[in-house]
Amino acid sequence: MTPKTPPHQLQLNEHGQLRHFLTTEGLSTELLTEILDTAESFVSVGKQAVKKVPLLRGKTVVNLFFEASTRTRTTFELAAKRLSADVLNIDISTSATSKGESLMDMLWNLEAMDSDMFVVRHQASGAPHFIAEHVTPSVAVINAGDGRHAHPTQAMLDMYTIRRHKGDFAKLNVAIVGDVLHSRVARSQVHALRGLNVGEVRVIGPKTLIPADFEGLGAKIYYDMAKGLKDVDVVIMLRLQKERMQSALLPSESEFYRLYGLTMEKLAFAKPDAIIMHPGPINRGVEIESAVADCSRSVILQQVNYGIAVRMAVLSMAMSGQTEVAAQEGGV
Amino acid sequence: MTPKTPPHQLQLNEHGQLRHFLTTEGLSTELLTEILDTAESFVSVGKQAVKKVPLLRGKTVVNLFFEASTRTRTTFELAAKRLSADVLNIDISTSATSKGESLMDMLWNLEAMDSDMFVVRHQASGAPHFIAEHVTPSVAVINAGDGRHAHPTQAMLDMYTIRRHKGDFAKLNVAIVGDVLHSRVARSQVHALRGLNVGEVRVIGPKTLIPADFEGLGAKIYYDMAKGLKDVDVVIMLRLQKERMQSALLPSESEFYRLYGLTMEKLAFAKPDAIIMHPGPINRGVEIESAVADCSRSVILQQVNYGIAVRMAVLSMAMSGQTEVAAQEGGV
Amino acid sequence: MTPKTPPHQLQLNEHGQLRHFLTTEGLSTELLTEILDTAESFVSVGKQAVKKVPLLRGKTVVNLFFEASTRTRTTFELAAKRLSADVLNIDISTSATSKGESLMDMLWNLEAMDSDMFVVRHQASGAPHFIAEHVTPSVAVINAGDGRHAHPTQAMLDMYTIRRHKGDFAKLNVAIVGDVLHSRVARSQVHALRGLNVGEVRVIGPKTLIPADFEGLGAKIYYDMAKGLKDVDVVIMLRLQKERMQSALLPSESEFYRLYGLTMEKLAFAKPDAIIMHPGPINRGVEIESAVADCSRSVILQQVNYGIAVRMAVLSMAMSGQTEVAAQEGGV
């Protein structure tokens, strides 16, 4: 699955509107800001007595999960339902592929059912991109996490959280801490932060867990928490992929916690009003101390809350951008 | 999970309205009657051409099943959908907890998604109570069965069935028969029957399967069907938990059936117009004879029918009681 | 499960309207045509901005799958949702029956919840028929595939595809090719084609994979592709049930492909404008060459598209026919 079309070209229609949402890489400041502004209007929907708007009424959204993730699937399902869409959950690991059908045959079938949107989670990097390249123009593709590549809606909810709690990106130092190597969200965060012209992005972790190319993305690399957290406004902790720690990449879990686990003590290096973020699910005592996760400066649960609104924004924007494409090219 | 707040205090708001529904214990006659009266109005919804009312439109109801139960989950899903709610089914045994997330972190996440109600099924007694103690005020918790402790919506649909078919509780003798020890519903039934001032509650079964404290709850204990069923108006059979009968609690399944299985012969001890009830699924020939289950005095399928209406009543009442609380305390 | 009532009697109400949909056998030309005409009106629904019509609003449709089939379940779920019904998915292999409940007890329970329709998939031939014989008059039963017996909605979407692409049935020669023995759809196709007065129906395959009774159904049997495909207007390929090919029925998969696989070369025997159909999922290189599956004369994906519309037609017609019955006989 080696994509041919550059993503920034693939995911926008000719008017520069979002049509698919595959990556935060290459998106303009204007478009990133439009996503955040659109999400703003949806945050209040979750507080209404009737948490629904009719924007996607009568649309068919297919959650196409090649890798199980109850948490992510749930947030997309809720976002789609609050937009009044009809939602189909398809768990691929237990279904069609067992009959030996090819990926493309399965997608063509779902297209033929007049589906409007595929929300794709896949263990292989690039899979949503590949799918977006091959689907009919009337279907929008949303990346719900692919391999170690990207998790763009998670990155955008992080951006929303930062803007809401700390304001102007240009004045902020943001640190991303931990197992960057195995994270699909770190890369998406760096692209989004750079696209929003953040003051400074830092990446902190052990050498073995920071990929070589992160400096090229515009992030400063730190191997030491004291130096890396100095004067930051935002600390984004990454989940330690414990299942992968049997490898030789790290001496031990406790050693990792001692050096990079976010404790109250290490948090003192950051600005006194720095906020703490985490994409969840958190490993208490592995990459973050419970006292930090639960303190008043932690905005971890607010992230979850904004996550529904940001996904509603992305779904409705992509549906609208793709409808325009379909109208011009003619759908199936 | 040892609860701190007494349930009768926890499940009511300051105006005495239902806010969570955890147990039938300690509920006033007025409130129990209000549930039955509310259910009355919903029974007819199932007979309409459009089986829907808009009471929970735009609300998010999460079926949080830590223990699989297709039957119970289906009844709550239907009840919520007929109230026009958006329903999320989360089967915990196969999901989030596999990533090592704590129960509370998972609940906080679901809260943060602006969920309105958790319908909780759990193998541990007290789990829904524990959850109700810790959720944010804007979320209502409904107990869909916890360990051997309680199954209050099942008990209330039984009460509805009794009232509908036999009228005034004060004039009735009700017998609960069988494996009381392993039943989560028997305890809820006794509390509800006592709360509704039933004439007499009897519990019938072998000594090994009747917990010592049932006499204290206001039930008369019988070890003999002939004596226990004499002059009763209602016979509630319990399901024999066959998977647990390998234990030393009973000599054999056939011996149990000989002594306590409800046959036409034993039914003759009861009043001629006594009705027969069972929470289902029934074990034909284990605790009940097929001829009894299918006879005209059996109201087992009516129980299922009323069950949807009773759950609609409980869901809508708790949502309304909790909305009042949330309005005062301020939600998330 | 040996049915007592003849299906053509069981599936129609006294006004000759569809009430259950169990088989295409014995249906009149008028009724078959009515299904196709009704589907016609639903094809456009899938192209609308709001893909929904309110015909089944407030109805409860239960997908009762005793055999897993994500593809078929998805098409029925979508059809029901686009008709605005509430849909319950029940996967029996993992649920109720594990508690030892009998099939009938389970069905009676679902009836008692005021369900309106059961969409039944079962590995045993005759199961949907058996269920239709025993359900309460207010419930309609739709056969979503039973054993090797029938798959009537698949056959009707095939008929719709043929009419849409080739017009008048009387002028057409239609060939059904491949593993007829293990196919549930071949029998339904022959009945439907005969009911619609097709010019000629041919069945092509190895002797071991064509049941003896197909000639009696009005089909001409061919063991040779060159002769069988001569002058046909429509080629319907069947899926080779690979999992069953370990048996002694065929020498090898490659031998089967050599003799009966639809290649461009063999397709040349048919009329130059013959269309190619397949119920999916296709086995590329097993019963059909990729070039054939993807050529301009292949209407395989159109079949999927029409499938939603045809299922919407069958669901709405059966609901309407059964409502009339229920009104007369009185429901539960």
Image (cartoon, coloured by chain):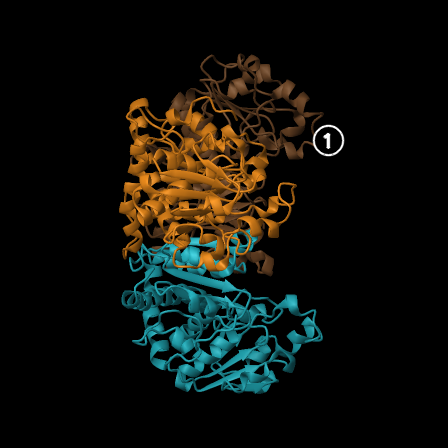
Chain colours: A brown, B orange, C cyan
How packed is label 1: few (under 14 Cα within 10 Å), some, or many (20 or more)? few
In the displayed structure, B25 sits above or below C103; it is above
The x and y percentages for residue A139 are 42, 53
- Residue A98 placement (x, y as % from top left): 60, 57
SS at circle 1: loop
- Left or right relative to A246: residue A77: left
- In the picture, measured across the screen, residue B94 lies left or right of residue A160, that is right
Chain under numbered label 1:
A
Q: Is residue A232 above or below residue A81?
A: above
Q: Mark 1 points at which residue?
A: A248
Q: Nearer the viewer, residue A198 or B66?
A: B66
Q: Is residue B261 left or right of residue B244?
A: left
From the top left corner, tell me how far across and down residue B322 is, in percent: 33, 30
Q: Which amino acid does label 1 sit on?
A: Ala
Q: Nearer the viewer, residue C208 or C274?
A: C208
* Residue shown at 59% from the left, 14% from the top: A226
Vertical placement of A209 versus A4: above or below? above
Q: Viewer-proximal residue, C151 or B188?
A: B188
Corner quadrant of residue C255: bottom right
Image: B10 above or below C261: above
Q: Is residue A12 visible?
A: yes
> B193 or B230: which is nearer to us?
B230
Quarter of the rendering occupied by the C terminus of chain A: bottom left
Label total for image: 1
Q: Where is residue B244, by image quadrant?
A: top right
Location of residue B19 in the rendering, given as x and y in whole percent from the top left corner: 35, 31
